[in-house]
Amino acid sequence: MSRPRNQVGTRAAARANGWCGGRFRCVLAITAALFLLMVLAGAPPDTAWAQPASPPGGAGAQSTGGFPSNLTETRHDPEIWRILRQGGRGHTAIPDRKAGVLIQASGQWWREFREDLLPRYGIWGLSGICALLALFFMLRGRIRIEAGFSGRAVLRFRPFERFAHWLVAVSFIVLAVTGLNILYGRDVLKPLLGHNAFTEVTAYGKWLHDFTGYSFIVGLVLILLLWVRDNMPSRHDLIWLARGGGLFSGGVHPPARRFNAGQKMIFWFVILAGASVSFSGICLIFPFTFTPFSDTFAGLNLLGFTLPTDLSAVQEMQLLHAWHAVLGIIMIIVIIAHIYLGSIGMEGAYDAMAWGDVDENWAREHHPLWAAELDLKMPREESNLSE
């Protein structure tokens, strides 16, 4: 006896719906179970799922902000973002503990300084000194030997002294050029050379910058040992400074021994600034090794200052980079003025470091006390310096 067609279709649909519904629920349950197992398997063994990261060394917030005690209850709270923005540090399983800081807030200051403030003020300083020297040359002209060349040479620097000077000079020029390329090369050289060539030039320049720093340090030590005695301050330096060294008007020859007050200022600036920029460079070559700013701030706090002494390793590197770059630009500005006066700015000055000798009249006009100490009545060597 056959069943009604509509009844057969209804029962078949009912069986199909019931099987599919049950199978769907079964698959859903299996999927949920597998997902839960994967989550539990992926959780750290010493923490529960979604448990907050804790600062190293125990629970509680650090001075820069710590995570709340229960992240599951406050994971949508803006307080979490505030803590992260303030440099809150959590737990990390890898050896690099710096990775526990998700957001390093001081990095934003460093990036703004590196990308905006440093190049902007640096180009102002470099352009400013060039403009001032050009204006000085237009108004004063080249400082001539008023009595003219005598043709008699006076020994000023021995060969080893000139070697030490040029070791510092050449090393500094290499450091300055490669350092300026790191700072401005992307905007100046890259459009001219292209990406690939600029990358090669900068890579070799960085290598040259690092290793030339050691020859610069050796040169600093040599000139310190050779000239420290002659560069000690004296009462004559005050007179030289009061008269402007005779740089701004003719006929003025203030007293000076082997080195005048201006040269002494350059000498001590190069020694002190060079030592500081060299040390900061070594700290950058060997990152996360030294803590000069934390140690310096701790010493200054003994004098009544309230400087931070709990700087992170990354903050130390950022401050070292800023100090190294700023001091390097200041040194370049000062040395540009020194090069100008030692070459086109003053007649006869370049001969001292080029050949070691200077004209007798040059010595009498610019270093009269030193010239008086020499036996100029019997010239050491005859030379035609006027050519």
Image (cartoon, rainbow, N blue to C red):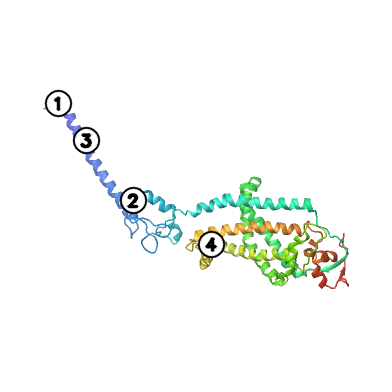
Mark 2–mark 3 contact, CB under 8 Å?
no
Which mark's residue is nearer the viewer, 2 or 1? 2
* Residue closer to the observer: 369 or 293: 369
- Looking at the picture, tell me which residue is in the foreground, 23 or 283: 283
Q: Residue at position x 54%, y 59% from top?
A: 319
Which is more toward the observer, 57 or 246?
Answer: 246
Camera-side mark, 4 or 3:
4
Tag shown at residue 17:
3
> Which numbered marker is on residue 4?
1
Type of amino acid under label 1: Pro
Secondary structure of residue under mark 3: helix
Determine which of the numbered discs, if any, sits on residue 74 in the image.
2
- What residue is at 65 percent from the left and 62 percent from the top? 212
Q: Is residue 18 rendered to the left or right of residue 92?
A: left
**Disc 4: which residue:** 287
Of the two numbered discs 3 and 1 in the rendering, the one whose residue sits closer to the viewer: 3
Under circle 2, the secondary element is helix
- Disc on the earlier residue, 4 or 3: 3
Identify the residue at horizontal 19%, vertical 29% (top origin). Answer: 9
User: Label 4 to label 2, Cα distance in Å?
Assistant: 37 Å
Mark 2: amino acid: Thr
Cα separation between marks 2 and 3 = 43 Å
Q: Earlier in the sequence, mark 2 or mark 1?
A: 1
Of the two numbered discs 2 and 3 on the same chain, state the one appearing first in sequence. Answer: 3
